[in-house]
Image (cartoon, rainbow, N blue to C red):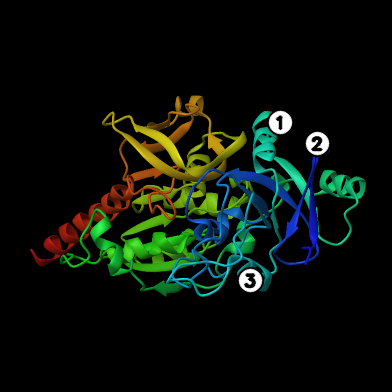
Amino acid sequence: MAKKKGMLVLEDGSTYIGDSLGAEGEWVGEVVFNTSMTGYQEIITDPSYWGQMVVFTCPHIGNVGVNEEDVESRQPYVRAVIARQICEQPSNWRARRSLPDYLREAGVPALSGVDTRRITLTIREKGVMRGALSTEDLDAERLLEAARNAPDMSVLTPVDEVTCTEPFAWREAVDRGWISKLSYDMSAPHQGSPHVVVIDCGTKHNILRHLVGLGARVTVVPAHAKAEDILALRPDGVLISNGPGDPERAPATIATARALMGRVPIFGICLGHQILGLAAGARIYKLPFGHHGGNHPVMDLTTGEVEITAQNHNYAIAMESFEALPFEMTHLNLFDHTVEGMRHKTLPIFSVQFHPEASPGPHDSLHLLRRFVAMLECATEGETHAQTN
């Protein structure tokens, strides 16, 4: 039986038709491509993709199905899934359902059989564009108008759509089955159990799992939480998480980050890195087609070592804006020489543009989460020692 068709039209007028394997209806959103070869489930449930139609450059996804353990949030956040081939009959012992079934249940459209190479080359040449997707009325002219009239991501406030509504404690650690593959030992005793407050701009579960696995007590608070409310929780450190959209559309979080500087150690990841930059007075700009994938080489300028990193962002900190700030650049992207990390020259504040939790992606940068928790453990032990003397 012939499959129902769907159509994607980009704002430049290019048109793509594929088999509809997800939800039925019409959507508009920003179209980006992701170069990761594995981890489609983690990508689809990453809140940083809110409002974006993700084009997978990997030619075949869905072959291992979907399970309950590998999700990175409470639901899929991508606006649509576009692939060359989506497997409808998965073969893996961990699979609980197929990817098309999962997407249909979540209300996410999916097009299979699409020329994803052409889409990727178009975006690389012309930059990220808005698109319109329909499985109901495949009128290219009408969808082109819808794409061009869709709101730009820079005017939206997606962090408000993905953050939690109330503070809560997170207690789940990384699955012990993965520990032998990681760079730390969960069975080792942890001193101090530092309290980390995570500002949830769209945090991925694996960031929280690693913090717990490293011995931290974790409290997650909404992105709009005020500095006074966070300090009232008596944190040993604050982590500002990843999240979607333009960081300048999160003014409350920027104000909180600025107010916390010098009062508590801070670590920023991805959007959190950009928010820290804005709080410090740096400038942000939008990249032509962003960084989305698990194969980006980044040099640690403090050691000269190169790490292969996982990334998902459309914005970056302007390198020249560091000149008048008490911050210095620590990491450099070797693809396009953009800023990938920074640290304060005197205060315990640092951040990275990439994802050290590696889900999906290489484990090269897990040491950064370990460094953050170890820094807080040392501070906690020192405070305890001072109190006992």
Q: Residue at x 34, y 61 (%)?
A: 210
Q: CA distance from mark 3 to mark 2?
A: 31 Å
Q: Residue at x 36, y 72 (%)?
A: 172
- Indicate the secondary structure of the residue bearing disc 3: helix
For the residue carrying disc 2, how many other residues have a C-alpha within 10 Å: few (<14), some (14-19), or many (20+)?
A: some
Residue wearing tag 1: 126
Looking at numbered disc 2 in the image, what kind of residue is underneath it? Asp
> Which residue is located at x 59 percent, y 61 percent?
87
Q: Is residue 48 left or right of residue 51?
A: left
* Dot 3 amino acid type: Asp
| Disc number placed over residue 101 in the picture, else none | 3
Residue 356: x and y in percent read 38, 49
Dots 1, 3 in contact, CB < 8 A: no
> Which mark, residue 12?
2
| Alpha carbon separation for disc pair 1 and 2 | 9 Å
User: For this view, does 19 lie left or right of residue 274?
Assistant: right
> Tags 1 and 2 in contact by the CB under 8 Å rule?
yes
Residue most extreme to the front: 1
In the rendered image, is residue 124 in sight? Answer: yes
Q: Nearer the viewer, residue 300 or 56?
A: 56
CA neighbours of label 1 inside 10 A, class few (<14), some (14 to 19), many (20+): few
| Kind of residue indicated by mark 1 | Lys
- Image quarter for residue 283? top right
Q: Is residue 235 visible?
A: no
Q: Nearer the viewer, mark 3 or mark 2?
A: 3
Q: Quadrant of the N terminus?
A: bottom right
Q: Earlier in the sequence, mark 1 or mark 2?
A: 2
